[in-house]
Image (cartoon, rainbow, N blue to C red):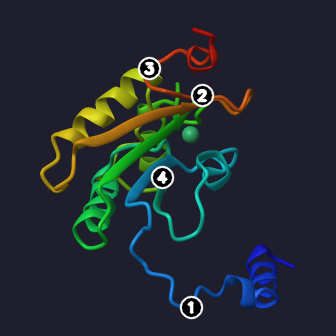
């Protein structure tokens, strides 16, 4: 049985717990999280989120693409969020990937897309640039609370950009 069939039957057996009667589509905690689509990142468990708390926007890399900005703009302007948290991570599939080689694969298949893969070498620098782009983004009315986190799937540590992984836990 394919995944789609399994997913349908799984959902069908759980409709009562999936139902959210009366739950507002406006995120309760007024926050949107932009994160990499990596399978090792469980945002709800990691950030202490419950259903209804936050908008979750995921893409390859957790990059601030035009479409991520579209979603964040909807999140703020139509659905009331005021904070953004961006989550990137160690060992991302885009780190060290080749923009040129990826483009060549697409050209082989006869397409020349308008978007870039988004490959990067410098994780912190890329996240810093993403935060700068968001803070300059006039599509977003709320830009005072934009933070960037880096997750390490090997250790489970989540740290803020520019802060060492163990600094938060260190005794004063
Ligand atoms: Zn990733």
* Mark number, residue 122: 3
Q: Secondary structure at mark 3?
A: loop
The reply to whether dot 1 and dot 4 touch (C-beta < 8 Å) is: no
In this rendering, position of residue 110 left or right of residue 105: left
Q: CA distance from mark 3 to mark 1?
A: 44 Å
Local packing at callout 2 (Cα closer than 10 Å; few below 14, some 14-19, many 20+) is few
Q: Position of residue 107 (x, y in %)?
A: 41, 48
Residue 76 in the image: x percent, y percent? Answer: 27, 63
Between 108 and 96, which is closer to the camera in this rendering? 96
Residue 120, above or below 66: above
Q: Tell me the crowding category of disc 1: few under 14, some 14 to 19, or many 20 or more residues within 10 angstroms, Cα based.
A: few
Label for residue 59?
4
Residue behind mark 1: 21
Q: Nearer the viewer, residue 103 or 73?
A: 73
- Residue 16 drawn at (x, y percent): 73, 90
In what element is the residue under mark 4? strand
Disc 4, disc 2: CB below 8 Å? Answer: no
Q: Residue at x 32, y 65 (%)?
A: 75
The disc, 3 or 1, on the residue closer to the chain's N-terminal end is 1
Residue on which disc 2 sits: 90
- Mark 1 against mark 4, which lies toward the viewer? 1
Tell me the quadrant of the picture where the N terminus can be found. Answer: bottom right
Q: Residue at x 73, y 90 (%)?
A: 15
**Label 1 with label 2: CB-CB less than 8 Å:** no
* Image depth: mark 3 or mark 1 in front: 1
x and y, in percent, of residue 168 in the image: 57, 20
């Amino acid at each position: 049985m394919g995944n789609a069939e399994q997913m349908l039957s799984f959902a069908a057996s759980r409709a009562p717990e999936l139902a959210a009667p009366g739950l507002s589509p406006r995120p309760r905690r007024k926050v949107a999280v932009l994160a990499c689509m990596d399978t090792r990142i469980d945002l709800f468990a990691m950030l202490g989120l419950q259903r209804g708390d936050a908008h979750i926007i995921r893409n390859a890399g957790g990059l601030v693409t035009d479409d991520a900005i579209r979603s964040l703009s909807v999140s703020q302007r139509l659905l009331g969020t005021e904070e953004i948290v961006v989550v990137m991570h160690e060992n991302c599939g885009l780190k060290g990937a080749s923009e040129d080689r990826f483009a060549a694969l697409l050209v082989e298949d006869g397409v020349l897309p308008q978007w870039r893969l988004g490959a990067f070498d410098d994780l912190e620098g890329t996240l810093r640039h993403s935060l700068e782009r968001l803070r300059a983004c006039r599509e977003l009315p709320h830009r005072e609370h934009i933070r960037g986190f880096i997750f390490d799937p090997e250790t489970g540590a989540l740290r803020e950009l520019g802060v060492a992984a163990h600094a938060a836990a260190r005794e004063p």
